[in-house]
Image: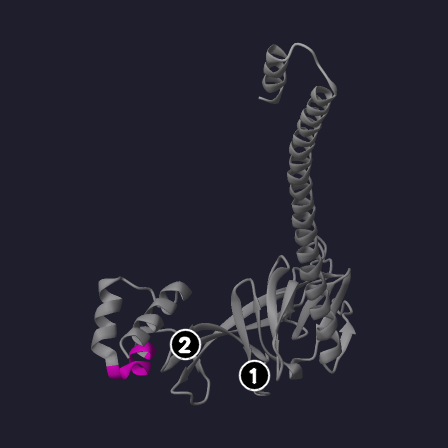
Amino acid sequence: MIIFTILSFFHHKKTPNKNNFYFINSTLSALHNNQLTKYLTKMKKQLLLFVGLILLISNYSVAQDLELTKNLSQIRDLKLMVEVILKAKDSKKTAIDGSSYLNKDWAKGYIKIIGKGEFKIDSLNYDLYTNTVLFKSNGQTYSISNNNIEYFVSDSAKFINTFNKNFSQPYLEVLCNGKKLKLFKLFECVIIPGSPNKGVFSEKNDEYRIESKFYTNYDNNNISKFNPTKKNLYKLMDDKKETIEKYIKDNKIKVRNQENLINVFNYYDSLN
Protein backbone atom coordinates (compact mmCIF):
# COMPACT_ATOMS: atom_id res chain seq x y z
CA MET A 1 0.00 0.00 0.00
CA ILE A 2 2.82 2.41 0.88
CA ILE A 3 4.79 1.59 -2.32
CA PHE A 4 1.65 2.14 -4.39
CA THR A 5 1.26 5.61 -2.81
CA ILE A 6 4.87 6.55 -3.73
CA LEU A 7 4.44 5.47 -7.35
CA SER A 8 1.19 7.39 -7.61
CA PHE A 9 2.94 10.45 -6.26
CA PHE A 10 5.61 10.35 -8.98
CA HIS A 11 2.99 9.77 -11.65
CA HIS A 12 1.36 13.11 -10.85
CA LYS A 13 4.58 15.03 -9.99
CA LYS A 14 7.16 14.48 -12.68
CA THR A 15 9.84 16.82 -11.30
CA PRO A 16 10.97 15.84 -7.80
CA ASN A 17 11.95 18.57 -5.34
CA LYS A 18 13.07 18.82 -1.73
CA ASN A 19 9.57 18.26 -0.42
CA ASN A 20 9.26 15.22 -2.65
CA PHE A 21 12.32 13.62 -1.10
CA TYR A 22 11.06 14.46 2.40
CA PHE A 23 7.79 12.68 1.60
CA ILE A 24 9.62 9.65 0.20
CA ASN A 25 11.92 9.50 3.24
CA SER A 26 8.97 9.72 5.62
CA THR A 27 7.12 7.03 3.70
CA LEU A 28 10.09 4.62 3.70
CA SER A 29 10.59 5.25 7.42
CA ALA A 30 6.98 4.37 8.03
CA LEU A 31 7.43 1.22 5.98
CA HIS A 32 10.54 0.30 7.99
CA ASN A 33 8.83 0.99 11.29
CA ASN A 34 5.80 -1.09 10.27
CA GLN A 35 7.97 -4.08 9.30
CA LEU A 36 10.02 -3.71 12.47
CA THR A 37 6.86 -3.67 14.58
CA LYS A 38 5.58 -6.85 12.92
CA TYR A 39 8.97 -8.51 13.39
CA LEU A 40 9.16 -7.51 17.07
CA THR A 41 5.59 -8.69 17.65
CA LYS A 42 6.41 -12.05 16.10
CA MET A 43 9.59 -12.35 18.17
CA LYS A 44 7.69 -11.41 21.32
CA LYS A 45 5.16 -14.20 20.74
CA GLN A 46 7.93 -16.71 20.12
CA LEU A 47 9.79 -15.54 23.22
CA LEU A 48 6.66 -15.83 25.38
CA LEU A 49 6.02 -19.32 24.00
CA PHE A 50 9.62 -20.31 24.77
CA VAL A 51 9.48 -18.90 28.31
CA GLY A 52 6.14 -20.63 28.92
CA LEU A 53 7.59 -23.94 27.80
CA ILE A 54 10.61 -23.50 30.09
CA LEU A 55 8.33 -22.69 33.04
CA LEU A 56 6.16 -25.72 32.32
CA ILE A 57 9.17 -28.05 32.25
CA SER A 58 10.61 -26.38 35.35
CA ASN A 59 7.35 -26.71 37.30
CA TYR A 60 7.04 -30.39 36.34
CA SER A 61 10.61 -31.01 37.46
CA VAL A 62 10.04 -29.13 40.73
CA ALA A 63 6.86 -31.14 41.37
CA GLN A 64 8.74 -34.39 40.87
CA ASP A 65 11.53 -33.21 43.16
CA LEU A 66 9.03 -32.19 45.82
CA GLU A 67 7.29 -35.59 45.66
CA LEU A 68 10.62 -37.38 45.93
CA THR A 69 11.67 -35.12 48.80
CA LYS A 70 8.36 -35.79 50.55
CA ASN A 71 8.79 -39.55 50.26
CA LEU A 72 12.37 -39.42 51.52
CA SER A 73 11.31 -37.11 54.34
CA GLN A 74 8.62 -39.59 55.40
CA ILE A 75 11.17 -42.39 55.54
CA ARG A 76 13.49 -40.22 57.66
CA ASP A 77 10.61 -39.24 59.95
CA LEU A 78 9.62 -42.88 60.32
CA LYS A 79 13.13 -43.83 61.36
CA LEU A 80 13.25 -41.01 63.91
CA MET A 81 9.73 -41.49 65.22
CA VAL A 82 9.80 -45.06 66.44
CA GLU A 83 11.67 -46.05 69.58
CA VAL A 84 13.52 -48.95 68.06
CA ILE A 85 14.81 -48.98 64.49
CA LEU A 86 17.36 -51.63 63.84
CA LYS A 87 19.02 -52.90 60.74
CA ALA A 88 17.29 -56.25 60.45
CA LYS A 89 19.54 -59.22 60.96
CA ASP A 90 18.96 -62.47 59.17
CA SER A 91 18.01 -64.72 62.06
CA LYS A 92 17.27 -67.64 59.79
CA LYS A 93 19.46 -70.68 59.59
CA THR A 94 21.03 -71.23 56.21
CA ALA A 95 19.75 -74.81 56.24
CA ILE A 96 16.06 -73.90 56.49
CA ASP A 97 14.02 -74.26 53.33
CA GLY A 98 11.14 -71.99 52.39
CA SER A 99 10.40 -68.49 53.69
CA SER A 100 8.96 -67.03 56.87
CA TYR A 101 7.79 -63.86 55.10
CA LEU A 102 4.11 -63.08 54.66
CA ASN A 103 4.57 -62.18 50.99
CA LYS A 104 6.83 -63.87 48.51
CA ASP A 105 7.54 -60.48 46.93
CA TRP A 106 8.00 -57.26 48.90
CA ALA A 107 4.97 -55.08 48.30
CA LYS A 108 3.89 -51.46 48.55
CA GLY A 109 1.93 -50.51 51.63
CA TYR A 110 1.84 -48.20 54.62
CA ILE A 111 2.38 -48.26 58.36
CA LYS A 112 0.23 -46.43 60.92
CA ILE A 113 2.34 -45.26 63.85
CA ILE A 114 0.49 -44.78 67.14
CA GLY A 115 -0.32 -41.12 67.68
CA LYS A 116 1.03 -40.23 64.24
CA GLY A 117 -0.02 -40.58 60.63
CA GLU A 118 0.28 -43.24 57.97
CA PHE A 119 3.65 -43.64 56.26
CA LYS A 120 3.74 -44.92 52.71
CA ILE A 121 6.31 -47.62 52.09
CA ASP A 122 7.48 -48.79 48.68
CA SER A 123 8.88 -52.10 49.92
CA LEU A 124 7.15 -53.72 52.90
CA ASN A 125 6.96 -57.22 54.34
CA TYR A 126 6.18 -59.09 57.55
CA ASP A 127 8.38 -61.79 59.05
CA LEU A 128 5.99 -64.27 60.65
CA TYR A 129 8.73 -66.17 62.46
CA THR A 130 10.32 -63.19 64.21
CA ASN A 131 7.03 -61.23 64.42
CA THR A 132 8.52 -58.10 62.88
CA VAL A 133 7.31 -55.61 60.31
CA LEU A 134 10.07 -54.86 57.83
CA PHE A 135 10.67 -52.16 55.25
CA LYS A 136 13.49 -51.40 52.86
CA SER A 137 15.09 -48.00 52.26
CA ASN A 138 18.26 -47.17 50.31
CA GLY A 139 19.38 -50.79 50.23
CA GLN A 140 18.90 -51.28 53.98
CA THR A 141 16.26 -53.46 55.65
CA TYR A 142 14.74 -52.10 58.87
CA SER A 143 12.51 -53.58 61.56
CA ILE A 144 10.09 -51.53 63.65
CA SER A 145 9.08 -52.13 67.24
CA ASN A 146 5.55 -53.57 67.40
CA ASN A 147 4.83 -51.30 70.36
CA ASN A 148 4.76 -48.34 67.96
CA ILE A 149 2.56 -49.82 65.24
CA GLU A 150 -1.23 -49.48 65.28
CA TYR A 151 -1.72 -51.32 61.98
CA PHE A 152 -0.05 -51.87 58.65
CA VAL A 153 -1.23 -52.62 55.12
CA SER A 154 0.75 -54.82 52.76
CA ASP A 155 -0.44 -55.63 49.24
CA SER A 156 -3.98 -54.38 50.14
CA ALA A 157 -4.24 -56.70 53.19
CA LYS A 158 -4.73 -54.85 56.49
CA PHE A 159 -3.21 -56.16 59.75
CA ILE A 160 -4.21 -54.69 63.10
CA ASN A 161 -2.09 -54.86 66.24
CA THR A 162 -4.01 -56.67 69.02
CA PHE A 163 -1.54 -55.72 71.79
CA ASN A 164 -2.62 -59.04 73.27
CA LYS A 165 0.19 -61.17 74.66
CA ASN A 166 -2.07 -64.23 74.66
CA PHE A 167 -1.76 -64.43 70.88
CA SER A 168 1.22 -66.14 69.30
CA GLN A 169 1.33 -63.26 66.79
CA PRO A 170 0.72 -59.57 67.52
CA TYR A 171 -1.16 -58.95 64.26
CA LEU A 172 -4.46 -60.17 62.83
CA GLU A 173 -5.48 -59.77 59.20
CA VAL A 174 -8.89 -58.11 58.85
CA LEU A 175 -11.04 -60.24 56.52
CA CYS A 176 -14.41 -58.71 57.36
CA ASN A 177 -14.76 -55.49 59.34
CA GLY A 178 -18.50 -55.71 59.99
CA LYS A 179 -20.47 -53.35 62.18
CA LYS A 180 -21.51 -56.14 64.53
CA LEU A 181 -19.36 -59.14 63.64
CA LYS A 182 -15.75 -59.17 62.46
CA LEU A 183 -13.62 -61.91 60.96
CA PHE A 184 -9.84 -62.10 61.38
CA LYS A 185 -7.04 -64.38 60.33
CA LEU A 186 -3.93 -65.13 62.37
CA PHE A 187 -0.79 -66.41 60.65
CA GLU A 188 1.86 -68.48 62.37
CA CYS A 189 5.22 -69.68 61.13
CA VAL A 190 6.73 -72.82 62.56
CA ILE A 191 9.85 -74.79 61.70
CA ILE A 192 9.39 -78.39 60.70
CA PRO A 193 12.55 -80.31 61.70
CA GLY A 194 14.48 -82.02 58.96
CA SER A 195 16.23 -85.35 59.11
CA PRO A 196 19.86 -86.46 58.67
CA ASN A 197 21.16 -88.65 55.90
CA LYS A 198 20.12 -92.24 56.60
CA GLY A 199 21.38 -94.62 53.99
CA VAL A 200 18.99 -94.55 51.04
CA PHE A 201 17.20 -91.49 52.49
CA SER A 202 19.00 -88.23 51.72
CA GLU A 203 19.35 -85.45 54.27
CA LYS A 204 16.31 -83.22 54.66
CA ASN A 205 16.65 -79.61 55.80
CA ASP A 206 14.45 -77.88 58.32
CA GLU A 207 11.53 -76.12 56.67
CA TYR A 208 9.41 -73.06 57.38
CA ARG A 209 5.70 -73.78 57.38
CA ILE A 210 3.07 -71.03 57.53
CA GLU A 211 -0.24 -71.93 59.17
CA SER A 212 -3.36 -69.88 59.82
CA LYS A 213 -6.39 -69.74 62.11
CA PHE A 214 -9.64 -67.77 62.05
CA TYR A 215 -10.83 -65.49 64.84
CA THR A 216 -14.04 -63.53 65.36
CA ASN A 217 -15.10 -60.53 67.35
CA TYR A 218 -18.78 -60.07 68.24
CA ASP A 219 -20.09 -56.68 69.39
CA ASN A 220 -16.52 -55.59 70.21
CA ASN A 221 -16.14 -58.26 72.87
CA ASN A 222 -13.09 -60.45 73.26
CA ILE A 223 -11.56 -61.89 70.11
CA SER A 224 -12.24 -65.62 70.00
CA LYS A 225 -10.86 -68.47 67.93
CA PHE A 226 -13.32 -69.69 65.32
CA ASN A 227 -13.54 -73.09 63.65
CA PRO A 228 -15.39 -72.53 60.33
CA THR A 229 -18.21 -75.08 60.32
CA LYS A 230 -21.89 -74.55 59.51
CA LYS A 231 -22.83 -75.42 63.08
CA ASN A 232 -20.48 -72.78 64.50
CA LEU A 233 -21.66 -70.21 61.95
CA TYR A 234 -25.32 -70.71 62.85
CA LYS A 235 -24.47 -70.41 66.52
CA LEU A 236 -22.44 -67.25 65.93
CA MET A 237 -25.16 -65.73 63.74
CA ASP A 238 -28.06 -67.02 65.82
CA ASP A 239 -30.14 -63.84 65.43
CA LYS A 240 -30.21 -64.39 61.61
CA LYS A 241 -29.87 -68.16 61.62
CA GLU A 242 -32.69 -69.03 59.21
CA THR A 243 -31.62 -66.38 56.72
CA ILE A 244 -28.00 -67.50 56.86
CA GLU A 245 -29.00 -71.16 56.45
CA LYS A 246 -30.97 -70.30 53.31
CA TYR A 247 -28.11 -68.17 51.93
CA ILE A 248 -25.58 -70.98 52.40
CA LYS A 249 -27.92 -73.59 50.91
CA ASP A 250 -28.98 -71.49 47.90
CA ASN A 251 -25.38 -70.57 47.05
CA LYS A 252 -23.95 -74.03 47.81
CA ILE A 253 -21.32 -72.48 50.05
CA LYS A 254 -18.41 -74.44 51.47
CA VAL A 255 -17.71 -72.52 54.65
CA ARG A 256 -14.15 -73.82 55.04
CA ASN A 257 -13.24 -71.94 51.90
CA GLN A 258 -11.94 -68.52 52.97
CA GLU A 259 -13.56 -66.55 50.15
CA ASN A 260 -16.94 -68.21 50.81
CA LEU A 261 -16.59 -67.61 54.53
CA ILE A 262 -15.91 -63.90 53.96
CA ASN A 263 -19.01 -63.72 51.73
CA VAL A 264 -21.16 -65.19 54.52
CA PHE A 265 -19.81 -62.66 57.04
CA ASN A 266 -20.37 -59.78 54.61
CA TYR A 267 -23.91 -61.00 53.92
CA TYR A 268 -24.63 -61.20 57.65
CA ASP A 269 -23.30 -57.66 58.06
CA SER A 270 -25.67 -56.43 55.30
CA LEU A 271 -28.64 -57.76 57.32
CA ASN A 272 -27.85 -55.57 60.33
On the question of residue 93 being in view, the answer is no
| Percent coordinates x, y for residue 135 in the rendering | 69, 67
Label 1 element class: loop
Could you say which is closer to the camera, residue 164 or residue 45?
45
Q: Is residue 71 above or below residue 233?
A: above
The residue at which mark 2 appears reads as 227
| Percent coordinates x, y for residue 253 in the rendering | 30, 64
Query: Which residues, given as a range, are shown in magenta?
Result: 232-239
Residue 58's disc is none
Could you say which is closer to the camera, residue 86 or residue 257?
86
Q: Is residue 11 above or below residue 265?
A: above
Left or right placement of residue 211 versus residue 176 in this view: right
Label 2 element class: loop
Could you say which is closer to the camera, residue 41 or residue 45?
41
What's under tag 2, amino acid-wise? Asn
Q: Residue at x 64, y 59 (%)?
A: 106
Q: Residue at x 69, y 11 (%)?
A: 15
The crowding category of the residue bearing disc 1, from other C-alpha atoms within 10 Å (few below 14, some 14 to 19, many at least 20), is: few
- The answer to which quarter of the image holds residue 85 is bottom right
The residue at which mark 1 appears reads as 167
- The answer to which quarter of the image holds residue 154 is bottom right
What's under tag 1, amino acid-wise? Phe
Could you say which is closer to the camera, residue 193 or residue 6?
6
For residue 234: magenta?
Answer: yes
